[in-house]
Image (cartoon, rainbow, N blue to C red):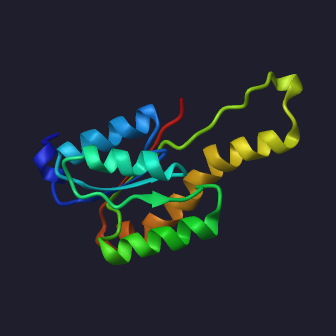
């Protein structure tokens, strides 16, 4: 695929300051795509945006919080443009073996790793449907 065909698009990337997320942001930015990176680490988001060769609108938000995701995305979409591309790569690990994992810890992992993808996908779908174009990539590691 010719990267120039994506120039001018906007991408929302969750887990943006992690290894995979930051690599995704760099590659998309190099293709001329505006980046809306999401993560909970404000300082790391700012540092990431300083390194990107494209316009960047960082969002400090916990993807497990549907209301916070909705509010942040709507603010970004109103100021820039709705996301044409969504890359969900936010994720955390449990530090315990299965037998030692508490239910609350399990729920937190699922809330970020699974529910977070639902929350962001719900924000981009209306625009993608209206323009009859969009790409959603869900990653796990």
The single residue placed furthest to the bottom in the displayed view is 78
Q: Is residue 125 left or right of residue 54?
A: right
Tell whether 33 sits left or right of 140: left
54 relative to 76 in the view: left or right? left
Question: Considering depth in this image, is 5 or 82 the residue closer to the camera?
Answer: 82
Numbered disc total: 0
Query: Quadrant location of the C terminus?
Result: top right
Residue shown at the point (20%, 53%) measured from the top left: 54
Where residue 69 appears, x then y in whole percent?
55, 65
Residue 39 position within the rendered picture, expressed as x and y whole percent measured from the top left: 50, 50
Asked if one can make out residue 87 in the rendered structure from this viewpoint, the answer is: no
Residue 129, quarter of picture: bottom left
Q: Can residue 78 be seen in this view?
A: yes
Name the residue: 37% across, 72% down: 77
Query: On the image, which quarter does residue 92 sit in?
Result: top right
The residue lying at 53 percent from left, 44 percent from top is 90
Residue 42: x and y, percent?
48, 53
Q: Where the N terminus falls, by quadrant?
A: top left
Apparent side of residue 17 relative to residue 30 in the rendered image (left or right): right
In the depicted view, which residue is nearer to us: 111 or 50? Answer: 50
Farthest residue, direction front: 43
Tell which of 43 and 141 is nearer to you: 43
| Front position in the image: 140 or 75 | 75
Vertical placement of 134 versus 104: above or below? below
């Amino acid at each position: 695929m010719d990267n120039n065909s994506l120039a001018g698009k906007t991408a929302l990337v969750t887990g943006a300051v992690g290894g995979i997320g930051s690599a995704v942001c760099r590659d998309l930015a190099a293709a001329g795509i505006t980046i809306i990176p999401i993560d909970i680490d404000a300082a790391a988001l700012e540092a990431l945006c300083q390194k990107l060769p494209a316009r960047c609108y960082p969002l400090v938000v916990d993807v497990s919080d549907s209301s916070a995701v909705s509010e942040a995305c709507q603010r970004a979409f109103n100021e820039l443009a709705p996301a044409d591309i969504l890359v969900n790569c936010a994720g955390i690990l449990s530090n315990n073996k299965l037998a030692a994992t508490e239910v609350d810890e399990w729920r937190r992992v699922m809330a970020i790793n699974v529910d977070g993808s639902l929350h962001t996908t719900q924000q981009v779908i209306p625009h993608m449907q209206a323009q009859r174009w969009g790409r959603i990539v869900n990653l796990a590691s």
